[in-house]
C-alpha cells in the first residue's frame, strides 16, 4: 500500500480522469482510528487517507467518472465540502493515478512495493480454484478444531522436551556425524518450510473470506529465492482478521515443529530419519523467530504496524535512528520509547537467529579444517568457505538492491 508519490497533476482543464468503479474505504487500524485506506480489492491497491477525509474522498472518486475535468471536480467538491481545497483533490488524484486506481489516464509508472520492484518472477502456481474448493471445508468448527489440535501439539511437545531434555542432542544439527551435511540439509529443507508457512497464510485467508490467487516464486534482487502468496483484499477486512492471517504463518511453523517433536519423542526411528526430522524442527523454529522480527517487512513487522495503528513504521523509525546517530553529539534529536523498543526487539530476534546460524557455521569451519586435505592454509580456506560464500551472497544482494533502487528512482 502506497501513500507517497511524486509528480504534478496533469493540466486541470484538459484531463477527464475516470476512477475504478470498485473503490471503497476501510479502517487500517481500529474502526475509530484516524488512519483509513481508499482502494480496490480487485487490484489490491490502496492509498492511505485520514478518517475525516473519507466522505470527501468517496465523493471525489464518484465525480471522477470520465465526464468532468479535474478542475470541475475541484469546484463541485469545494461547494460540498468547504474545508476541502483544490490541493486536497489534486493530491488524491496523484495518489490514485500513481497507484493504478484510475482507469484513465494511464500513469507512466505504477507505485510498487520494494519486493515487487526488485524481484524477478521465476514462475507462479494459480490457486484460485483450489482456494474456492477449500472455502466450504474451513468453516468455524473445523477451523477451531485444527487450531485446538495445534495448541495441544505445542503443549505436548514442550512437556516432552521439559521432561526429556536428552532429546536435544547433536542430532539436532548434525547429519550422520557431520555439521556440514547437517547445515546443507537444513538449507535445502528451508524451501519446504517456507512453502508450508505460505500455505498456513493461505488457509487463514480462505477462512476469513479471502481467496489466494497464486503462489509466486521470485528472485529478490535477482539472487535470493523468495516465495510470495498473492492474496487480494487484506486491507478490506477487520484488523483482528488481518492479524490472524499474518499470525497464521508463524503459528503453522510452530505447530509443524511441535508435531515433529511429538513424533520424535514417541516413536523409535532410525538415526538418519531422526536427524532429518530434527532439521525440520530447527528450521521451522528459526523461521518463527526471524519471521516475527519487525526488522524486515515480514509478518512481525506488519503485525506491529497494525497493533500500533501506525504504518510505514520501519521507514520512519530508521530515519529517526539515523538522525539520532548523526546528531547525537549535539543532542538535538531524541528517540522515543517506540523507536527504542523497535530497535531492541529487532536486534534481539535477529541476533538470536544469526547467533545460532553462526555457531553452526563455526562448527562447520572446524570440521572442514580437520577433514580437508593439504596444508593448514588449505584447511583454513576450506573452513571459511561457507561463511565467506554466505557473506559474499549477502553483500552481493545488498549491492544489487541499491543498484536497482537507484535505477528505479532515476527512471521516475
Image (tube, rainbow, N blue to C red):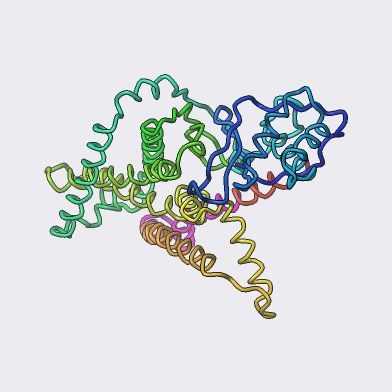
Q: Quadrant of the C terminus?
A: top right
Q: Quadrant of residue 121?
A: top right
The residue at 24%/43% (across/down) is 150
In the displayed structure, would residue 163 be above or below residue 151? Answer: below
Q: Please name whichever residue, 305 or 252, is drawn nearer the observer in this view of the structure.
A: 305
Q: In the rendered picture of this protein, how many numbered marks are placed on residues?
A: 0
In the displayed structure, would residue 79 be above or below residue 83? Answer: above
The residue at 56%/70% (across/down) is 336
Q: Is residue 188 visible?
A: no
Q: Is residue 274 visible?
A: yes
**Secondary structure mostly taken by the magenta-highlighted segment of the chain:** helix
Q: Quadrant of the N terminus?
A: top right
Residues rendered magenta in the picture: 368-396
Q: Please name whichever residue, 55 or 178, is drawn nearer the observer in this view of the structure.
A: 55
Q: Position of residue 22 (x, y in %)?
A: 59, 26
The answer to whether residue 146 is left or right of residue 248 is: left
The answer to whether residue 274 is left or right of residue 187 is: left
Look at the image and say whether residue 180 sits in the magenta stretch.
no
Look at the image and say whether residue 377 sits in the magenta stretch.
yes
Q: Position of residue 147 (x, y in %)?
A: 26, 40
The residue at 51%/69% (across/down) is 337
Q: Quadrant of residue 93?
A: top right
Q: Position of residue 204 (x, y in %)?
A: 37, 36
Amino acid at each position: 500500500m502506497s501513500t507517497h508519490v511524486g509528480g504534478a497533476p496533469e493540466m486541470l482543464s484538459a484531463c477527464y480522469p475516470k476512477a475504478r468503479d470498485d473503490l471503497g474505504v476501510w479502517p487500517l487500524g481500529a474502526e475509530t482510528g484516524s488512519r483509513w485506506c481508499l482502494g480496490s480489492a480487485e487490484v489490491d491497491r490502496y492509498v492511505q487517507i485520514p478518517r475525516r477525509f473519507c466522505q470527501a474522498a468517496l465523493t471525489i472518486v464518484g465525480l471522477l467518472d470520465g465526464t468532468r475535468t479535474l478542475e470541475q471536480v475541484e469546484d463541485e467538491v469545494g461547494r460540498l465540502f468547504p474545508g476541502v481545497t483544490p490541493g486536497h483533490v489534486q493530491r488524491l488524484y496523484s495518489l490514485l493515478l500513481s497507484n493504478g486506481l484510475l482507469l484513465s489516464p494511464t500513469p507512466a509508472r505504477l507505485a510498487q512495493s520494494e519486493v515487487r520492484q526488485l524481484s524477478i518472477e521465476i514462475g507462479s502456481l494459480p490457486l484460485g480454484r483450489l482456494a474456492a474448493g477449500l472455502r466450504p471445508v474451513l468453516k468455524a468448527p473445523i477451523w477451531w478444531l485444527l487450531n485446538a489440535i495445534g495448541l495441544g501439539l505445542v503443549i505436548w511437545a514442550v512437556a516432552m522436551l521439559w521432561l526429556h531434555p536428552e532429546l536435544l542432542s547433536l542430532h539436532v544439527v548434525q547429519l550422520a556425524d557431520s555439521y556440514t551435511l547437517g547445515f546443507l540439509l537444513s538449507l535445502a529443507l528451508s524451501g519446504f518450510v517456507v512453502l508450508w508457512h505460505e500455505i498456513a497464510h493461505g488457509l487463514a485467508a480462505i477462512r476469513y473470506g479471502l481467496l489466494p490467487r497464486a503462489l509466486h516464486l521470485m528472485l529478490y534482487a535477482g539472487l535470493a529465492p523468495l516465495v510470495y502468496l498473492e492474496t487480494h483484499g487484506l486491507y478490506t477486512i477487520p484488523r483482528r482478521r488481518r492479524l490472524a492471517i499474518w499470525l497464521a504463518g508463524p503459528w503453522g511453523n510452530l505447530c509443524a515443529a511441535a508435531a515433529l517433536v511429538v513424533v520424535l519423542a514417541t516413536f523409535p526411528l532410525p538415526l538418519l530419519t531422526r536427524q532429518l526430522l530434527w532439521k525440520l524442527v530447527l528450521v521451522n523454529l528459526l523461521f518463527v523467530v526471524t519471521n516475527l522480527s519487525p526488522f524486515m517487512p515480514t509478518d512481525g513487522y506488519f503485525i506491529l504496524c497494525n497493533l500500533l495503528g501506525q504504518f510505514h513504521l520501519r521507514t520512519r523509525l530508521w530515519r529517526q535512528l539515523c538522525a539520532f546517530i548523526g546528531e547525537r553529539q549535539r543532542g538535538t534529536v531524541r528517540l522515543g520509547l517506540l523507536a527504542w523498543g523497535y530497535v531492541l526487539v529487532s536486534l534481539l530476534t535477529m541476533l538470536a537467529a544469526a547467533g545460532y546460524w553462526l555457531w553452526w557455521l563455526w562448527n562447520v569451519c572446524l570440521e572442514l579444517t580437520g577433514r580437508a586435505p593439504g596444508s593448514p592454509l588449505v584447511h583454513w580456506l576450506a573452513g571459511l568457505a561457507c561463511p565467506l560464500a554466505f557473506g559474499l551472497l549477502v553483500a552481493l544482494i545488498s549491492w544489487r538492491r541499491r543498484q536497482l533502487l537507484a535505477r528505479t528512482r532515476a527512471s521516475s
